[in-house]
């Protein structure tokens, strides 16, 4: 397995596990406003969804030689998770506001990742 795919696989698994842990902590120990609780739930849902997306990407890439589009999609999913999901979680759980302006770039990275994966899928060679 090429190093990028191994990284995507490990990142996806750790990201999914962290999202479950943060969900449990938030549900049992935190008192958040309704708005903050909804924002945290949305960030955690997107984190889990993109962890699954990364896993699918790894499986697809293992079917053949991963394309530059596939690898770009994986990198964009990782960037989106860091800039969007983890950024919101840090802000709501720890009060870290310094990275808040980067949240929209994380959303854009998620969208660009799906477009890159679609282009990579469209360009796949039939065997």
Image (tube, rainbow, N blue to C red):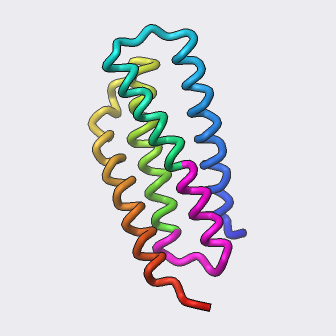
Query: In the image, is 62 to the left or to the right of 105?
Result: right
Does the magenta segment cover residue 66?
yes
* Residue 56 x, y percent position in the rendering: 59, 61
Location of residue 46 by image quarter: top left
In screen coordinates, is 72 left or right of 65?
A: left
User: Which residue shows up at 68% across the image and 69% down it?
Assistant: 2
Measured from the top left, where is residue 4 in percent x and y?
61, 63
Q: Please state, as top left, top right, bottom left or bottom right, where the C terminus lies in the image.
A: bottom right
Q: Which residue in the rendered view is the most extreme toward the bottom? A: 127
User: Can residue 53 be found in the magenta stretch?
Assistant: yes
Residue closest to the eye, 25 or 96:
25
Residue 77 image offset from top left, x and y in percent: 47, 54
Choose between 104 and 55: the one closer to the eye: 55
Q: Main secondary structure of the magenta part?
A: helix
For the N terminus, give its image quadrant: bottom right
Please give the name of the residue rendered at 57% of the width and 51% of the height, measured from the top-left corner: 52
Image height of 40 relative to 7, above or below: above
Number of marks: 0
| Residue at image location 43% in from the left, 37% down from the top | 85
Question: Where does the image place residue 50, in percent across and percent down from the top left?
Answer: 50, 49
Residue drawn where x is 59% and y is 41% of the image = 15
Choose between 104 and 101: the one closer to the eye.
104
* Magenta span: 51-70
Rendering quarter of residue 29: top right
């Amino acid at each position: 397995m090429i190093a990028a795919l191994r990284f995507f696989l490990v990142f996806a698994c750790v990201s999914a596990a962290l999202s479950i842990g943060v969900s449990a902590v938030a549900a049992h120990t935190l008192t958040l406003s309704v708005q903050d609780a909804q924002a945290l739930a949305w960030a955690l849902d997107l984190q889990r969804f993109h962890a699954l997306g990364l896993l699918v990407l790894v499986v697809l890439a293992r079917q053949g030689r991963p394309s530059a589009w596939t690898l770009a999609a994986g990198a964009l999913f990782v960037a989106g998770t860091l800039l969007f999901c983890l950024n919101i979680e840090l802000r709501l759980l720890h009060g870290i506001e310094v990275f808040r302006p980067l949240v929209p770039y994380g959303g854009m990275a998620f969208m660009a990742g799906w477009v890159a994966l679609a282009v990579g899928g469209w360009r796949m060679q039939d065997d």
